[in-house]
Amino acid sequence: MLQEWLKRCYRRLPADQQSLRGFGRALFLPIHTHLLVLAFLLFWYLQRQYVASFHHVVLSGALISGIFTATRILLLARLGNLHKAALVASLLCVLVLFFNDLRGALAESFQALHIPLQSRLRYDLVLFGLFFGTAITWVVRTRRSLVQVTQAVEVFSLVLVCLVGIQILDFTPLAPAKSPVSSLESLNDLPTSTKPPRDIYLILVDSRTSSSALKRYWNYDDTGFTSELQRLGFQCPQNATSEYFTTPHCISTLLNMETPRVPTNLQPKGIVSYLARSIRDSRVAGFLDHQGYEIVNLSLFDLLDQPRFYAFFEKGSYFSIFASTLPGVLWRDYLNHAYLKGANEKILSELARLPTRFAGRPRFVYAHLMMPHDPYLYDSHGQTKPMALVLSNKMDSHAYLEQLIYTDQLILKTVRSILSQSKTPPIILVRGDHGFRHLPPPDRDAEEREAFFAAYFPDNRSLDWPANVSHAMVFRDILNRYFGTSIPLE
Ligand SMILES: [Zn+2]
């Protein structure tokens, strides 16, 4: 049947493309569709050149080129005009491959022009759908010869490839950044601690804002949550903040005890990769490993030799290339929610199970819940919203609050279980990395750096930290308290 259909398509091709030579030429000329695929891959590679696998890029390129070439041939059979078929294929190529970049450029233009409009996927889909739909309709219907348009697109695509190619050639290898804090450099030279070893739980609650911000922006009082934590022995400093509003920056600062010095020549995705690497090789994990700790990684980042528990930012080069395309964006924003829901549930069940499992040595547990961060799947009582599994709007501050209230309940249940089941009382940190990032300006800038913090210390020593407890201070304090280091808190 497929064979029949292919034969029918072939017979519909214009006469000069029915010879082997003519068909071969039609596959490659005009060349702009292939140049656009090449530009997309080079641009992807430019943003992740420190982590990308080159042969994955080449194989993905061959596959994507094959898909658009097949599309072009089918369009040629339908439209009977090579220029039209190639131009429609190239327009589809730009829409599918550069959708994310076009959205980013649009959002940046709005920001530069001080237009208070925030990019939302469904509006962007309608907007770009209309634009490309109109352009494709014009190409299909026009009676003009499209030779000049084709030439212009050829030049444009070639210039695009050259511009990205030049930036890739400008590659600078990364040099490891040196720490200005000498006391951090010699951490692993310290003798192992003589104090009774205690498990350390870092429970990261992604996007959990501070209590004061909840009052200020949501008119919500979370005293029920904080007073129950205090009853259990936690201290909840009200002055905790975050140095950043993006997860990798926050976690890198938390686990390296200082703000990262990211090379200035990195593109946004390269920054994520760079920070993920700095988290994997972090000082805190290295120090605790040296102290004989078992590293338990329930997070979205690799940690020493422990692979990430679930994927959030990247899943290797093939997946990352897919995630940059329009189908990938749709998958991530509308269909990935069940995956994250499952990851959160697994983290919580691991946290409940860990204290009962004999380890033989102390543990450092880094659990990173992707809650109350979107997708907002739960109401405040923990009922799953069925539609949210496919349509969660990350800007919805009310849905965020509902999920935050339920997350607080889960946290209470989890810390109660850890405290009651641990043989030696552990250290527990409950930390938000940043706040809610989608309030309308100007509140957004202040809110996104709000971060919840509560700490349980078995000896119940009171916190004597300076104002604005930041990510960089948290482990400096813990190492000083429990491992005899004397790292300055600021
Ligand atoms: Zn985060």
Image (cartoon, rainbow, N blue to C red):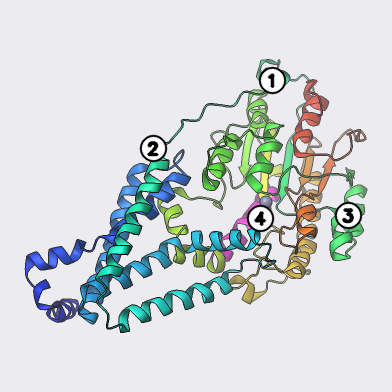
Q: Residues within 10 Å of mark 4 (few under 14, many from 20)?
A: many
Look at mark 4 in the image and give the residue it sits on.
Answer: 370
**CA–CA distance in space, label 3 to label 4:** 22 Å
Look at mark 2 in the image and give the residue it sits on.
Answer: 169
* Residue at image point 50% right, 67% down: 330
* Residue at image point 72% right, 54% down: 207
Position of 212 with respect to 41 (left or right) is right
- Proximity of marks 2 and 3: CB atoms separated by less than 8 Å: no
Look at mark 3 in the image and give the residue it sits on.
Answer: 212
Q: Nearer the viewer, mark 1 or mark 2?
A: 2
* Residue at image point 12% right, 80% down: 11
In this view, the residue in front, 274 or 399, is 274
Position of 452 with respect to 88 (left or right) is right
User: Percent x, y for residue 476?
Assistant: 77, 29
Look at mark 1 in the image and give the residue it sits on.
Answer: 187
Looking at marks 3 and 4 on the same chain, the residue that comes earlier in the sequence is marked by 3
